[in-house]
Amino acid sequence: MINKKFASAEEAIADIQDGDTLLMGGFGLCGIPENCIEALVKKGVKNLTCISNNAGVDNFGIGLMLHQKQVKKMISSYVGENAEFERQLLSGELDVELIPQGTLAFRCMAAGYGMPAIFTPAGIGTEVAFGKEIRNFNGKDYLLEQAFESNFAIVKAWKGDTAGNLIFKATSRNFNTVMAMAGKITIAEVEELVEPGELDPNQIHTPGVYVHRIFQGSHYEKRIEKKTIRE
Amino acid sequence: MINKKFASAEEAIADIQDGDTLLMGGFGLCGIPENCIEALVKKGVKNLTCISNNAGVDNFGIGLMLHQKQVKKMISSYVGENAEFERQLLSGELDVELIPQGTLAFRCMAAGYGMPAIFTPAGIGTEVAFGKEIRNFNGKDYLLEQAFESNFAIVKAWKGDTAGNLIFKATSRNFNTVMAMAGKITIAEVEELVEPGELDPNQIHTPGVYVHRIFQGSHYEKRIEKKTIRE
Amino acid sequence: MLDKEAIAKRIAKEIQNNSYVNLGIGIPTLVANYIPKNIEVCFQSENGLLGMGPFPTESEVDPDLINAGKQTITMMPGAALFDSAMSFGMIHAQKIDLTILGAMEVSENGDIANWKIPGKMVKGMGGAMDLVASAKNIIVAMQHVNKSGESKLLPKCTLPLTGIRCVKKIVTELAVISILPQGGFKLLERAPGVSVDTIKKATLGKLIIDGDIPEMAFD
Amino acid sequence: MLDKEAIAKRIAKEIQNNSYVNLGIGIPTLVANYIPKNIEVCFQSENGLLGMGPFPTESEVDPDLINAGKQTITMMPGAALFDSAMSFGMIHAQKIDLTILGAMEVSENGDIANWKIPGKMVKGMGGAMDLVASAKNIIVAMQHVNKSGESKLLPKCTLPLTGIRCVKKIVTELAVISILPQGGFKLLERAPGVSVDTIKKATLGKLIIDGDIPEMAFD
């Protein structure tokens, strides 16, 4: 089987350059590529465009990159919970494009399925529709939205094998699958990296063909944004 | 959890009427809804339009319905291996629309994702494109293809629970997932029906929200079309 | 006047048996606590879960299992997990029967604004634009007036819209109101002890009062 | 003149290390038997499998595990299963590096016809139209002439097309031919013992012969 194993986050992200566009998996702090973010912060690449549903919190997730002023533009659906983000946005240091969450998911999926664009009703009648093509099907209006393709996608899975097959846990799947499909180079960090044959082919969420580099991550903090418990 | 359990194939298909359009899962004879086909043959509904990748063989699968002259029209990607089919087609008793296999899959998926239409490059420059809208994105031509929605989808899974969640085995998944998503009423027959909580939520291929009726099938023959072995 | 819990309790009565429901952040989240015993409902969380259960106990907490509000949660028996594309796929395919969400403004033709206040911080629409663009039935849970005492039920929204002609019903601390297909806020129920006149004064959009307006019942 | 096995063997030499390959029905299926030991290749079967293995032994036969030709098969360690939408999704997203398929006709600009003979039985295009519309590299395995002795390498296809301007290379019992970007069949190799003249006579489309044409090597 084709072997995509990389030794470390540093190696896996080594060719990411200033100005690159990165698709980054996760929802809130759930399922984010902690090791790659750490390596990107260490590497210090700048002027990045990050396509990610959220922007992390002040001192975790993409928030760490924002703190280092590595991000020029965020494309997200929701960017609350981040004071440094707010400061950079208000000061004009950071450019932000907000798009509906489903549109974000579909635009990534479209890239992974070779579809140049998709139709969605989300945003019809709102400022999201400004300047976009609207088309009516069966009495309902839809926006035409373009596929998101990106040189790099960075995702985080629970288990993976060296052939690049990925399995996610619980709701950490979120955008990781669709972003993995949309990267020209997809980098996957996993909590547990195994040999081909150890994962059940029937349970794989992302087939290895969509993954170009995989490495075993370490020291996952998995910070919880809003721990809520019942008595 | 919402309970979708039906007692039998007969009950599950009871309201299918003459003239209905049915999405039917399976690839060749792999993963076809054997119990529902048997019940449809027994019920004797006629003038059906069947959307299915293949048309079965002479004496199995949809071939059984063709033999009873229950099918008015087939929408498929490949219809070889069936002499009675060929006879009905040449005699004009049967109407056939052939569409590319990926287009069939995407049109079903589109319905299940609330997308009214999708773009595909399959069929550009061929007779499949006749009369269809062609659109160029980034230098490449695509056909606009409409979502397939149908009053009924009939699929076959390996395991399911009474909440309608489905797990498929090996390559019997094929069109079953996308067709399950496209039915206004989706009927699933399963080899093993269990209580909610017995399936791992992380391994479910079709979430129960897409399934309206589920029953435990029986006496699966799983006929093999081309048994090919190595010494 | 109802408190938030009572608004949630009143909305819970709207939930049909055997339905799939998406709950927004805030008051809508509380609705889950008031589902009658004889009602079977399956909650969707748009980050990728059908069959959301209650908050976890301390020992059940799993950082990989959260809801769309980023709170730790649990799964019910029969739950299913999926990715964001399938999640919004089932929303757009109208497989979710009811969406309950908060709002800053609702107009008398059912437009809703709940994602942006120009000049102030913009947090984003998250999944709200998808939900309101496709839900078969949308109930808004909100306060009748804002902190400045201005009505949030308007002839026309003043804030940037989230979606158009989509809200079917509104439950506030004062009233239950439906939005008529031809437009207009039709008053259905008063909160206990709240007069029609109080509701009138708090409603800037066209309020339709037809006959006697009963008090809400909660059982 | 090559037999089918030799055509397959010659095509196998075209397969790059670490590539994903889709094999059509017929001669292309045989290619899998001739992959050199030092070449890592992953076969896709468009009915929903990456990592297709050899045919099963009698005891391994599983009716739920077939290839796109409906033959019983096995899976390699590291295989992945998926549905038809994702399968054609990865095809259209050009994640598959090479497609090898049969043809009834190929034109000198790379058009291919392989799914229908008007007036005779029509079996359908199956996944062929999707594959030829998107594959980065398409190699056709076929006989140089049909049963009536007519060339299948034409200036223009006469049969209904499967796809346009997509074929990159053709391997027949007589020759290896590439299709030039500007059009034309460029002769690359002769089958052992076959003369350029024989190939010329069997090729109706524009054949480009540039210098000495070597015999195929098979090691």
Image (tube, coloured by chain):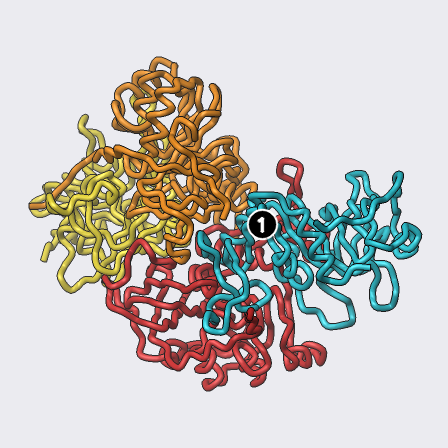
Chain colours: A red, B orange, C cyan, D yellow
Q: Quadrant of residue D211?
A: bottom left
Point out the residue furthest to the front here.
C219
At a point 29% along the width and 56% down the height, the residue shown is: A201
- How many callouts does the rendering have? 1
Question: Is A220 left, or right, of A136 in this rendering?
Answer: left
Spot occupied by residue C136 in the image (x, y as percentages of width and height): 64, 43
Bin the neighbour count of mark 1 within 10 Å (Cα to Cα): few under 14, some 14-19, many 20 and up.
few
Q: Is residue A158 above or below residue B177?
A: below
Question: Is B204 left, or right, of A227 in this rendering?
Answer: left
Spot occupied by residue C111 in the image (x, y as percentages of width and height): 76, 50
Q: Quadrant of residue D156?
A: top left
At a point 46% along the width and 66% down the height, the residue shown is: A172
Question: Is B140 left, or right, of C14 in this rendering?
Answer: left
Spot occupied by residue B226 in the image (x, y as percentages of width and height): 19, 36
Question: Is D106 left, or right, of C166 in this rendering?
Answer: left
Q: Is residue B108 above or below residue B11?
A: below
At a point 82% along the width and 53% down the height, the residue shown is: C191
Residue D31 visible in the picture: yes
At a point 81% along the width and 47% down the height, the residue shown is: C189
Nearest the eye: B200 or D177: B200
| Quadrant in which the C terminus of chain D appears | bottom left
Q: Which residue is mark 1?
A: C37
Residue A152 visible in the picture: no
Q: Is residue B197 above or below residue B68?
A: below
Amino acid at dot 1: Lys
Spot occupied by residue A147 in the image (x, y as percentages of width and height): 52, 56
| Quadrant in which the N terminus of chain D appears | top left
Nearest the eye: C7 or C95: C7
Circle 1 chain: C
Q: Secondary structure at mark 1?
A: loop
